[in-house]
Image: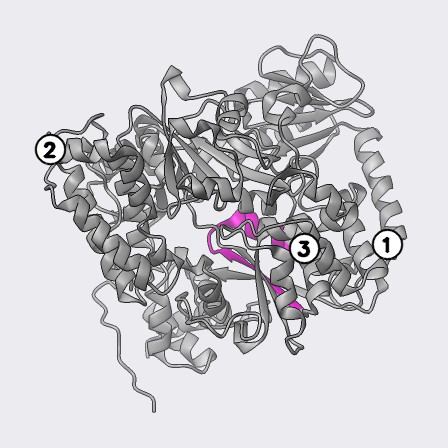
């Protein structure tokens, strides 16, 4: 196995060949966002056009630069030159772009976004100065759109594995935990629990085996930052998991991803194979005494699988239904062994925290929310994207300065944050800072980072019925307050949306909701009333207009909503088969 | 047992046995069968139970819980439409209604040549509304674009 220094020097040579070799380097963002915008069509056309023009170039699929609104993004770097970006590229525009820039050394005007790096190019914008990039401070996503997620040398060339190397050779496990604790890093999955403290729980648990479980279930509609990291730079996660493993004395890791999310799954599996091939996973990592194995584990489609004990059930191959606690995972986790569960984002910060120190990380952000927020900005906003920004920006700065304001010149009505179990905030909350505690006080949560912008044309009842339909559909069915409560909440909300609600219905919602909060087994039921409560808190008028005036204030509820209506077990398709019974004693 | 049944069982066993993982269990085996056949035939329930030394009750319990499993062969084309909040705001309901009408259906399920599913989030919210046709994500989809894509599917056949 190569030593770190050998690997680094090989990686540096590779990188200089890519950026300053004898052929242009073309990078195309093919993460889910680029994919949906048509990046694969662009990629195929680039390959066929290069052949037709007889031009040799290296073409890499990369992840996400954050500016989703500019996808598909075509990035061409000539040897020794800056990167030149073409935005919103259509398949039919590819031949002209390649012909002009590669053969005629001329920059075609259409689609040009600008250049990045040196030397500067006159007359086109410097991409680093556009708000979508200028206001970002990328840590977990530092390599997004820059390195190919299937080339570990590109990661190493950009500082990869410096953190793990420092941890393994210069720090004791307890020093690693102290560094992460001192950095103030709080879990980015939603609960915002201090990551270093969580790690410390498992240190004294007996092993081997002990497990680090990385949660990339990410079922929140409106959030795609975990998948974004895996598609852009899975290595930072793998390195972060190794650091967590070293700190806690763990022996194995699982990356838990939803079946069907092919981009994140394939890219993570490729990264794991390359890490093994280079001695960065497996026995005696980087020649140290530390050994660690990582494998991808797939869950079926189930939102509750993201709950930490349900996740362990799914890793063991069963229904993803939560367990009773205690015992807690740090003592009794997957297969009854000590386990620590972290979100992708939390683990992906670890390499940079160790490399640059706790002080550096805690200097970013505000109050008890240190570091960056990875925001999935979407909905009725001009420039949606995946923006990693310092904690402490206001919602207004994110939506207006980065996101370019509300689409079509409409007024902002609401911001839905923190996923379907989060809440909505009104336009008066634009001054609220992205800070875990401040957002909670404002009546919403930052959660996993989704911010859905909603304009004045949408009724609060309409968005609420969509969120409640989701939480009802995803109730795992184990505990009855959630299973039955969700169904009743949905029934009442749909009744109100259909202008058939009565004066008693709002009280009924509160009564069902507070019962669920008090008596459900896991966060799904406990928080399930959240979206309704916050909608009532800020937009009760929308509900009462439906009930008292028998009309929808915006008309958006009048369109019928089709959504799957099921409670688990899901049984739409047994094709007339009855489940055979088998009793084993 | 018919030879057809034997062939199917052979395929199922091959899928289950070719899992290159240390963590092989009921759920991973069901996924292996789903990836190989596109559905979970009743024989797979038995084979997965055998392979994992558990009961068919346990396997049915898992298979019926996760919404990505189906129990009859999928049609030639698969269409998934996202109904998450962002797609909802951006007008996915119109797309859903148009697609259902085109396929002569009233709910998710199978038409003669298309298996249609509603998905809670396809992960490309910045390009909402989103649908997926035969694993290809299509962003900013309109009802016209959706209808056109479905028409193309039928021409391809």
Residue situated in front as seen by the camera: A1 or A428: A428
Residue situated in front as seen by the camera: A102 or A399: A399
Residue A181 marker = 3
Task: Report the Cα–Cα distance between label 3 and label 2.
Answer: 53 Å
Looking at the picture, does residue A217 appear above or below residue A336?
Answer: above
> Element type at marker 3?
helix
> Element type at marker 1?
helix
| Residue A528 x, y percent position in the rendering | 33, 52
In the rendered structure, the answer to whether residue A230 lies left or right of residue A354 reads left
Q: Pick the quarter of the image with the N terminus of chain A.
A: bottom right
Query: Which numbered mark, 2 or 1, is in the foreground of this view?
Result: 2
Residue A34 marker = none
In the rendered structure, the answer to whether residue B114 lies left or right of residue A164 reads left
Can residue A573 be spotted in the picture?
A: no
**Residue at which label 2 appears:** A548
Q: Residues within 10 Å of mark 3 (few under 14, many from 20)?
A: some
> Element type at marker 2?
helix
Protein chain holding label 2: A
**Residue at which label 1 appears:** A4
Protein chain holding label 1: A
| Residue A46 x, y percent position in the rendering | 62, 28
Precedes in sequence: disc 2 or disc 1: 1
């Amino acid at each position: 196995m190569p030593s770190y220094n050998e690997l680094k020097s090989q990686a540096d040579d590779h990188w200089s060949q890519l950026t300053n070799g004898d052929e242009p380097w073309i990078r195309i963002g093919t993460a889910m966002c680029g994919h949906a915008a048509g990046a694969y069509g662009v990629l195929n056309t680039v390959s066929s056009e290069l052949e037709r023009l007889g031009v040799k170039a290296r073409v890499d699929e990369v992840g996400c630069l954050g500016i989703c609104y500019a996808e598909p993004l075509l990035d061409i770097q000539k040897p020794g030159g800056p990167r030149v970006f073409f935005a919103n590229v259509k398949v039919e525009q590819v031949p002209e772009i390649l012909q002009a820039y590669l053969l005629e050394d001329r920059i075609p005007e259409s689609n040009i976004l600008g250049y990045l790096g040196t030397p500067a190019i006159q007359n086109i914008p410097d991409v680093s100065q556009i708000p979508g990039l200028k206001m970002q401070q990328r840590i977990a996503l530092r390599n997004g759109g820059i390195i190919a997620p299937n080339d570990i040398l590109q990661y190493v060339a950009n500082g990869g594995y410096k953190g793990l190397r420092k941890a393994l050779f210069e720090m004791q496990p307890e020093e690693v935990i102290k560094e992460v604790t001192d950095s103030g890093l709080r879990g980015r999955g939603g609960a915002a629990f201090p990551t270093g403290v969580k790690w410390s729980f498992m240190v004294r648990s007996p092993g081997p085996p002990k497990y680090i479980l990385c949660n990339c279930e990410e079922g929140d509609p409106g959030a795609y930052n975990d998948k974004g990291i895996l598609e852009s730079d899975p290595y930072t996660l793998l390195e972060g998991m190794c650091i967590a493993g070293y700190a806690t004395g763990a022996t194995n890791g699982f990356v838990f991803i939803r079946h069907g999310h092919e981009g994140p799954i394939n890219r993570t599996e490729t990264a794991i194979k390359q890490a093994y091939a280079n001695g960065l996973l497996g026995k005696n990592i980087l020649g140290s005494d530390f050994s660690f194995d990582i494998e991808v584990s797939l869950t079926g489609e189930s939102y509750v699988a993201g709950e930490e004990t349900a996740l362990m059930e799914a890793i063991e191959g069963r229904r993803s239904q939560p367990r009773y606690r205690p015992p807690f995972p740090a003592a009794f986790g997957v297969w009854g062994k000590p386990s620590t569960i972290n979100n992708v984002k939390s683990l992906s910060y670890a390499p940079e925290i160790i490399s640059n120190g706790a002080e550096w990380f805690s200097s970013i952000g505000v109050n008890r929310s240190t570091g960056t927020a990875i925001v999935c900005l979407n909905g009725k906003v001009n420039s949606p994207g995946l923006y990693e920004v310092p904690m402490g920006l206001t919602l207004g700065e994110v939506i207006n300065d980065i996101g370019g304001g509300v689409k079509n010149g409409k007024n902002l009505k609401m911001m839905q944050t923190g996923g379907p179990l989060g809440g909505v905030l009104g336009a008066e909350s634009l001054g609220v800072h992205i800070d875990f505690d401040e957002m909670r006080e404002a009546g919403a949560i930052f959660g996993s980072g989704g911010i859905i912008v909603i304009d004045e044309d949408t009724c609060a009842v309409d968005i609420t019925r969509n969120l409640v339909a989701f939480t009802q559909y995803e109730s795992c069915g184990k505990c009855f307050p959630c299973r039955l409560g969700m169904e009743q909440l949905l029934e009442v909300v749909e009744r109100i949306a259909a202008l058939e609600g009565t004066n008693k219905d709002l009280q009924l919602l509160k009564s069902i909701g507070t019962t669920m909060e008090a008596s459900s087994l896991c966060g799904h039921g406990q928080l399930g009333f959240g979206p309704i409560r916050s909608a009532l808190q800020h937009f009760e008028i929308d509900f009462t207009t439906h009930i008292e005036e028998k009309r929808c204030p915006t008309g958006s509820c009048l369109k019928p909503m089709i959504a799957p209506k099921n409670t688990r077990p899901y049984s739409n398709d047994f094709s007339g088969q009855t489940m055979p019974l088998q009793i084993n004693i | 047992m018919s030879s057809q049944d034997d062939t199917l069982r052979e395929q199922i066993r091959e899928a289950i046995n070719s899992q290159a993982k240390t963590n092989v269990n009921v759920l991973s085996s069901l996924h292996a069968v789903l990836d190989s056949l596109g559905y979970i035939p009743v024989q797979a329930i038995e084979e997965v139970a055998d392979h994992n030394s558990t009961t068919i009750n346990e396997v049915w319990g898992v298979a019926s819980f996760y919404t990505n499993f189906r129990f009859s062969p999928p049609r030639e084309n698969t269409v998934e439409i996202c109904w998450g909040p962002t797609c909802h705001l951006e007008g996915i309901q119109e797309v859903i209604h148009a697609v259902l009408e085109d396929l002569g259906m009233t709910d998710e399920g199978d038409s003669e040549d298309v298996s249609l599913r509603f998905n809670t989030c396809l992960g490309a919210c910045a390009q909402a509304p989103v649908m997926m046709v035969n694993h290809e994500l299509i962003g900013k989809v309109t009802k016209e674009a959706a209808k056109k894509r479905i028409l193309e599917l039928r021409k391809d056949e």
